[in-house]
Image (tube, rainbow, N blue to C red):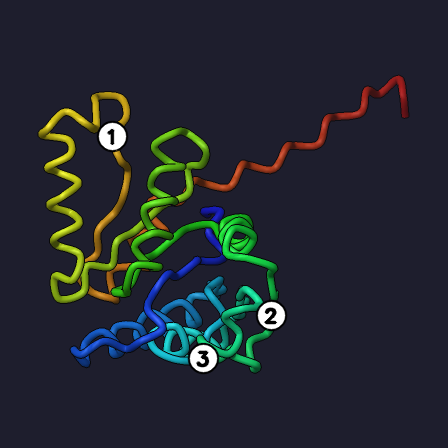
Amino acid sequence: MTQLSSICVYCGSSAGDDPIYAESAERLGTTMGEAGLGLVYGGGAIGLMGITARSVMAAGGHVIGIIPQFLKEREVMLETAHELVVTEDMHERKRIMFERADAFVALPGGIGTLEELVEMMTWAQLGQHRKPVLIANINGFWDPLIALLRHMADAGFIRNGFEVSYLVANTAEEIVPKLLAAAPAKPAPHAAEPIPIADL
């Protein structure tokens, strides 16, 4: 058994131009809910954010939305989420998302999604966590980023011993199995110490 019980999904508050992005968000949410995995996400009701959250809930999964006060209207907060946390700012939002999740997935998205993904990769590189980070490279969306990471290493800016650790899934169906395989195992329960006969 692994310690994976909730996944933080970073994604766009838009659905993008290619229908495969929305389809993949729905499949991911359904897979998570059916696997008993909770969703931690940005709290929005629109775009890939809303699609993912509603799909998790429809499949029986628990959804935690975390959204800063100033984005409640812009990202249209999903009032039906099981738990909603309204933060003062983006820094608090990201910290709570990190604390409440066991793994991180980046679906297609914009600058905010990219920034959140790269921050988790940076923290892992610096040894601040060991939670799996997965790039959902749907229809090659993240190919330029993956190429850039290789280029950074080839140019000597990602040195040996400081490699950036991340997983890549090309389809929504691959995401949950890859995270389950990468998540650390739960520590075995300690066996009860035998009571010496003399103390009985």
For this rendering, which residue is in front, 43 or 37? Answer: 43
Tell me if 146 is positioned left or right of 29 in this view.
left
For the residues bearing labels 3 and 1, Cβ distance under 8 angstroms: no
Residue 80 position in % (x across, y down): 56, 82
Q: Secondary structure at mark 1?
A: loop
Tell me if 85 is positioned left or right of 22 in this view.
right
Residue under circle 3? Answer: 45
Q: Tell me the residue at 46%/65% (across/down).
A: 42
The amino acid type of the residue labelled 3 equals Ala
Query: For residue 84, which numbered disc appears in the image?
Result: 2
Q: Tell me the residue at 56%/52% (across/down).
A: 92
Name the N-terminal-most of marks 1 and 2.
2
For the residues bearing labels 1 and 2, Cβ distance under 8 angstroms: no
Task: Report the Cα–Cα distance between label 3 and label 2.
Answer: 12 Å
User: Does residue 131 lie above or below 48 as drawn?
Assistant: above
Residue under circle 1? Answer: 163
Q: Secondary structure at mark 3?
A: loop
